[in-house]
């Protein structure tokens, strides 16, 4: 309407087009922002949780990487949640079955990980979510209850897909930047510098294969040691976010008033 009004009233064209541009920019910001719930509910962290966090690994599974990741987690007695891509789960179900057997969780991360997820139409969104849900259930026998959008981008048609499959959208409260930082030690140190109880930490699988450098998996030992030193236990998203169904968390120390970490930049 605003561009049409600008055509019909040239004298007011500049403010009308400025208003139209501002609306477009605001809507684009809401679509591309990983955190925030302007376009539907989005879980980012557990609000009252002093001693547990969730490590999440996106974009697997990898025939040459996921087992090593599971070895490191097992050695530390840590649990994580994996957000595999549906087509990769179909091609390589073994590591996912092992992950489930060893107490880890899985979530839906779409069937093909579309780069233009924010612009995907209704049919595409329903297909991506539904096909991934079936692929993960076939691969593991477990039906996911969490959904993480590609790149954390939002989509106007997602709510219908989530409701259809009983999924809840979850992004993260702490980004590791393992897709950007070249040094795995820096990835671990960045997470350890910022992590707090209740955080959901974003990590990725398989970066070494795709970009010729080692991803967060290489720094995972350092990360797990640092978390233990801080008294933080990595648990699954189910355990961290399930509310009354989750095991009661110990309360080793009181959180000072005003120290709630919500809203922290990541
Ligand atoms: Zn991803």
Image (cartoon, helix red, strand yellow):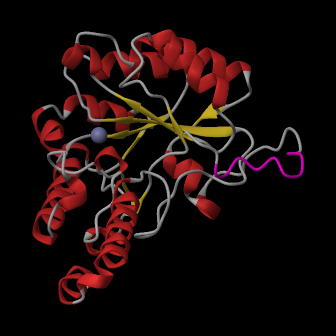
Q: Residue 4 vs residue 264: left or right?
A: left
So how many labels did they put on this image? 0
Task: Specify the quadrant of the image occupied by residue 20.
Answer: bottom left
- Vertical side of 215 occupied by 11: above or below: below
Q: Residue 19 vs residue 124: left or right?
A: right
- Vertical side of 222 occupied by 87: above or below: below
Q: Which residue lies furthest to the front in this view?
A: 11
Residue 151, image x, y percentages: 32, 44
Residue 234, image x, y percentages: 58, 33
Residue at 15% x, 36% y: name it: 88
Quarter of the image where the C terminus is located: top right
Quarter of the image where the N terminus is located: bottom left
Residue 132, image x, y percentages: 19, 53
Task: Specify the quadrant of the image occupied by residue 54.
Answer: top right
Q: Residue 154 vs residue 255: left or right?
A: left
The magenta region covers 255-263
Q: Does the magenta stretch include residue 115?
A: no
Residue at 56% x, 12% y: name it: 222
Q: Would you say the magenta stretch is mainly helix, strand or loop?
A: loop
Residue closest to the eye, 177 or 82: 177
- Vertical side of 123 occupied by 65: above or below: above
Residue closest to the eye, 145 or 4: 4
**Ligand 1 rendered quadrant:** top left
Residue 51, image x, y percentages: 72, 38
Q: Residue 235 vs residue 233: left or right?
A: left
Residue at 81% x, 47% y: name it: 259
Residue at 71% x, 51% y: name it: 248
């Amino acid at each position: 309407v605003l561009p049409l009004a600008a055509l019909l009233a040239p004298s007011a064209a500049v403010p009308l087009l400025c208003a139209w541009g501002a609306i477009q920019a605001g809507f684009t910001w809401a679509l591309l922002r990983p955190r925030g719930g302007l376009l539907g509910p989005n879980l980012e962290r557990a609000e009252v949780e002093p001693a547990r966090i969730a490590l999440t690994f996106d974009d697997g599974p990898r025939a040459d990487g996921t087992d090593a990741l599971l070895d490191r987690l097992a050695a530390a007695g840590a649990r994580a949640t994996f957000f595999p891509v549906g087509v990769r789960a179909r091609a390589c179900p073994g590591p996912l079955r092992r992950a489930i057997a060893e107490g880890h969780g899985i979530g839906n991360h779409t069937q093909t990980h579309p780069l233009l997820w924010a612009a995907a139409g209704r049919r595409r969104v329903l297909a991506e979510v539904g096909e991934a849900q079936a692929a993960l259930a076939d691969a593991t026998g477990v039906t996911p209850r969490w959904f993480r959008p590609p790149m954390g981008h939002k989509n106007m048609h997602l709510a219908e897909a989530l409701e259809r499959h009983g999924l809840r959208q979850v992004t993260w409260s702490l980004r590791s930047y393992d897709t950007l930082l070249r040094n795995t030690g820096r990835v671990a140190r960045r997470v350890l510098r910022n992590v707090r109880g209740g955080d959901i930490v974003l990590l990725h699988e398989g970066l070494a294969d795709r970009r010729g450098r080692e991803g967060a998996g290489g720094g995972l030992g350092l990360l797990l040691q640092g978390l233990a030193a801080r008294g933080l236990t990595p648990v699954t998203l189910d355990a961290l976010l399930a509310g009354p169904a989750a095991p009661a968390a110990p309360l080793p120390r009181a959180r000072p008033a005003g120290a709630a970490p919500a809203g922290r930049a990541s």
